[in-house]
Image (tube, helix red, strand yellow):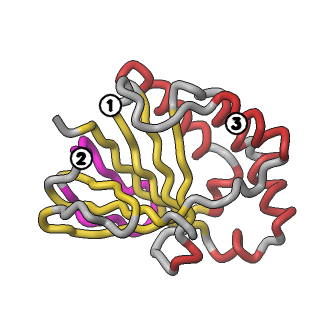
Amino acid sequence: MVDIFTFTGGSGGAWRVVESRTVKGEGLRAVESLAVAREPDDTAITSPAWTLRGFISNVRYATKTEVETLRSVQQGLARPRATLAALIPIRKNAAWWALAQDERREIFEETSHHTAIGLDYLPAVARRLHHSRDLGEPFDFLTWFEYAPEDAPAFDRLVDRLRATREWNYVDREIEIRLARAA
């Protein structure tokens, strides 16, 4: 059984929206807060404006060594000091999906160094990737990050570096939603 996570924007969720901006393509309706839950979602959010769904899958485009390195450094989510988060839904264009798996790997890692860049910011910035494309969702991936306030500059550098890579030439829709844990 696959765990499907829902990200519901509205009012009354556990995460308060600090900032939301459209990086590329069509945006999402502005919301006050975000709720994150495993389906079935038994936490009601007041006035939902949108819901995005995704599931955790095997690590794609990474070698065994890269996966082992990530797992050895990555810390879990919901750390007490990690009171800030970001949800970044991303959709890649048809040209990306027309590439063979090995071609995508070459761009993702050999050219863009996606995993290596991410490793530079672990364990400070915890992350989890949710796949959405196979669910027919409007985004291919829902990227979730959590970090402590003092690590916010590191998170900024992380996303700036990733967006400067060849891989990001294939992104045609991206939203960045910055969050703080609701009191």
- Give amino acid for label 3: Leu
Q: Quadrant of the N terminus?
A: bottom right
Q: Nearer the viewer, residue 167 or 12?
A: 12
Residue positioned most to the top: 150
Residue at the location (43% across, 54% down)? 23
Which residue in the structure is indicated by mark 1?
A: 83
Task: Give the Cα distance between marks 3 and 2.
Answer: 28 Å
**Mark 1 crowd level (few <14, some 14–19, many ≥20, 10 Å Cα):** some
Asked if residue 117 lies left or right of residue 157, the reply is: right
Tell which circle, 3 or 2, labels the residue nearer the N-terminal end: 2
Furthest-bottom residue in view?
A: 136
Question: Residue, x 24% and y 46% (percent of image)?
Answer: 14
Q: Nearer the viewer, residue 141 or 172?
A: 141
**The residue tagged with tag 3: helix, strand or loop?**
helix
Q: Position of residue 87 (x, y in %)?
A: 41, 50
Residue named by callout 3 = 70
Vertical order, 95 against 116 (above or below): below
User: Is 158 positioned to the left or the right of 62 in the image?
Assistant: left
Q: Residue 115, image x and y in percent?
A: 71, 41
* Three-letter residue code for mark 1: Thr
Q: CA distance from mark 2 to mark 1?
A: 11 Å
Q: Which residues are magenta?
A: 15-31
Image quadrant holding the C terminus, namely top left
**In percent of the image, x 54 and y 38: which residue is there?**
160
In this figure, which residue is indicated by the disc labeled 2? 14
Residue 78 painted magenta: no
Tell me residue 171's x, y (percent): 58, 62
The picture places residue 133, in percent across and down from the top left corner, at: 56, 73
**Helix, strand or loop at disc 1?**
loop
